[in-house]
Image (tube, grey):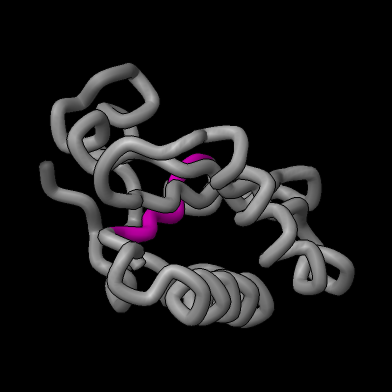
């Protein structure tokens, strides 16, 4: 597991995108505090293949077992005000720490390989 760190990873992105990603991080940190284990940018933005139709894919890594539907609703509600002014769709999903660290699915393996740790 060797994701790129934020300083190395998001600097090549347009300033507007960097600002949106940073604001997402701040909002999620404020809400989750110590429960936010990790946050990753992945997909086309992380690969520096962002297009006008791309979304900003975020993985929100949280500890323990939780209700994925409830956490997804919480994340959407938290980021909705930012979404109203962002130029790209923000697509954020929760993940359980143990599942993420165990590479439980192809998405997690891809994030470990090419994601940007925020």
| Quarter location, residue 21 | bottom right
Q: At x 43% / y 52%, what residue is drawn?
A: 60
Asked whether 14 or 75 is in front, the reply is: 75
State left or right for residue 33 relative to residue 84: left
Image coords of residue 80 (percent x, y): 78, 63
Image coords of residue 116 (percent x, y): 34, 57
- On-image quarter of the N terminus: top left
Dominant SS of magenta comes to: strand
Asked whether 110 or 104 is in front, the reply is: 104
Q: At x 60% / y 41%, what residue is drawn?
A: 70
Residue 11, placed above or below residue 70: below
39 within the magenta span: yes
Residue 103, placed above or below residue 76: above
Asked whether 64 or 56 is in front, the reply is: 64
Q: Which residues are magenta?
A: 38-43
| Quarter location, residue 36 | bottom left
State left or right for residue 42 relative to residue 96: right
Q: At x 32% / y 71%, what residue is drawn?
A: 6
- On-image quarter of the C terminus: bottom left
State left or right for residue 36 relative to residue 25: left
Q: At x 26% / y 42%, what residue is drawn?
A: 64
| Quarter location, residue 37 | bottom left
Spot the residue most to the right. 84
Image coords of residue 68 (percent x, y): 51, 34
| Total numbered circles | 0
Asked whether 78 or 2 is in front, the reply is: 78
Residue 83, placed above or below residue 33: above
């Amino acid at each position: 597991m060797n994701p790129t760190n934020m300083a190395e990873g998001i600097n090549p992105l347009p300033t507007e995108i960097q600002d949106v990603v940073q604001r997402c991080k701040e909002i999620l940190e404020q809400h989750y505090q110590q429960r936010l284990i990790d946050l990753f940018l992945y997909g086309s933005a992380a690969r520096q293949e962002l297009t006008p139709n791309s979304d900003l894919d975020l993985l929100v890594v949280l500890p323990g077992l939780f209700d994925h539907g409830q956490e997804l609703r919480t994340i959407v509600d938290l980021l909705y005000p930012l979404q109203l002014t962002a130029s790209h769709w923000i697509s954020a999903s929760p993940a359980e720490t143990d599942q993420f660290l165990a590479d439980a699915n192809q998405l997690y393996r891809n994030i470990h390989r090419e994601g940007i740790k925020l």
